[in-house]
Structures are given as C-alpha cells and as structure tokens.
Amino acid sequence: MSALARATRTLLFGSAFLAAAGTAGAQTIDGIVVIGANQRPVATTKLALLDRKQVVLDTTTTDVFGGFTFTAKKPGKYALLVRRKGYYPVVTETFELLKDETRRDTIYITGKSAELSVKEVIALDVRRVFSSASGAGFQRFLGPDEIEELRGHAFSLGDLVRDGRLAGLQWYNPPSGCLRFSGSSGCAQVFLDGIPVNLRIDAISASDVEAIVAFRDMELGVAATSRGGFDNSRFGAVLVYTRRFSPR
C-alpha cells in the first residue's frame, strides 16, 4: 500500500487479543469497531468475514456498543471488511485464527476515510487527478451503498454502468466495447483508482468496484483534459474505485 493511500485510509487492526477456550470445534472473533481520534464506538456498521481469497463467508452488523461476533467454521487466515453507510469500505490486515480460538480485537478506523464521506474523499481525488475541481459535481455517481444493491445481477463494470443509469453514460458495443457518453463520437477514459487504464470493460469485475463517478470532457474543462492520461481520442472520464485501493 502506498504512503499516499495510507494517508487516506489508516486502519489499525488491534494486536491485543486473548486466546480463550471457545466452543469446541468453533473459532470465534469478538470485537468492537471504534472511529476517530476519540475512539467512538459505531453502531449499525456492517462487517463481512473474508477468507484469504477475499471471498465473503459471513456478514453481521455492529450493535449499539459497536460490538460484533463472527464464528468461523475452520481455522485459517481471515480478514474483515468494514462498511459504514456513505463512507468508503475498508479491509483489515489478514489475521490467522487457530483451532478453537476466541479472538478479541478492537478495530480502529482513523484518518480521512473515517471523517469524510465517500463523496468528499473522491472529490479530493478528482482534484488531484485533474488539478481542479469539476464544476459538474456528482451528477453521475454510484457509491458503495448503491453498488452493493446492484451486485446480485451485475458481473462487470459495464453491467454496473448499464444498470445504474449514469445519466447518458452507456456501455457501447458490449462486451468488449467501451464507455461512451451519448452524443459523443469517442470513448471515455477509464481511471482505475486514479490511474488511466486501457482495459476491456467486461474485464473489470463488479465485485471489485466500490464507487463510480463520471464527467463529460466539457465538465472537466480544457485544462483538465489536457493532462491526466487523456488524448485526442477520449471524450470524458469515468473514475472507478475499488476496495483493494483507497482513493489517493
């Protein structure tokens, strides 16, 4: 993880844990989620238990005291995905759960991702990528909460764009095609976590995508589109953010 990413999202996975005798044949994770410098417990925060391949095994929601519990079927390496409504999801470092172990941890979420909404964090990244703020704001935006609802029948970035109805942005000539604004004669430039990429739209998995924001070239302005990976064949920008990389 880059130093810049760490500045945006700092996740300290509490190292103090107690090994205790748990229920025979079961491995348990008990914990609490706290946020900000004052370490305030956060209720109604969604968590997912991930295996070493980042596959979701189970989900839960923190109680009024910020507490949660997971039971793993077998020993192994796991991580936790933490979701707060309106905020960028974060993933803990991988940890190992031993046979019959009860692990107790405090998850501290600090830094900009804890204090700013996902729109505020991405607005900072748009300013970084294009050296200016877009006057268009977030007219075409899908955040983590909306995308989570679409994932049941969306398999790629193209599916999310099609099903999310991003105001004139279309998946042109699927499945290989590109993303194109209505009325434009060329494809938009896709940025993956702030980096311009040339990938098949169906090669970007919907399961990896956490947020999408799109701008026509005139909304970004001439100065912005003359840098940041644009060329004369590109019309507008589609910024895609994944849970593997924080907005810088």
Image (spheres, rainbow, N blue to C red):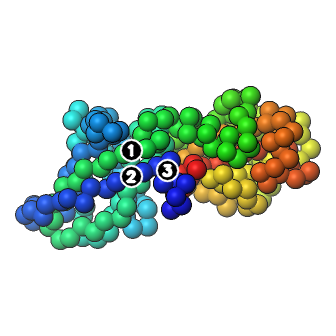
Picture quadrant of residue 18: bottom left
Contact (Cβ within 8 Å) of mark 2 with mark 3:
no
- State the residue in front, 173 or 121: 121
Q: Residues within 10 Å of mark 1 (few under 14, many from 20)?
A: many
Which mark sits nearer the N-terminus, 3 or 1?
3
Q: Which residue is mark 3?
A: 7
Q: How many angstroms separate mark 2 from mark 3 (CA)?
A: 10 Å
| Secondary structure of the residue carrying numbered label 2 | strand
| Nearest the eye: 99 or 122 | 122
Q: Which residue is mark 2?
A: 11
User: Please, what secondary structure does the residue beneath circle 1 have?
Assistant: strand
Mark 2 or 3, which is nearer the eye? Answer: 3
Can residue 52 be seen in this snapshot? yes
Horizontally, residue 170 falls left or right of residue 115, namely right
What's the distance in space between the residues labelled 2 and 1, CA to CA? 6 Å
Q: What's the residue at 36%, 45% (across, down)?
A: 109
Residue 216 in view (yes/no)? no
Q: Earlier in the sequence, mark 2 or mark 1?
A: 2
Residue 158, image x and y in percent? 69, 49
Amino acid at pointer 3: Ala
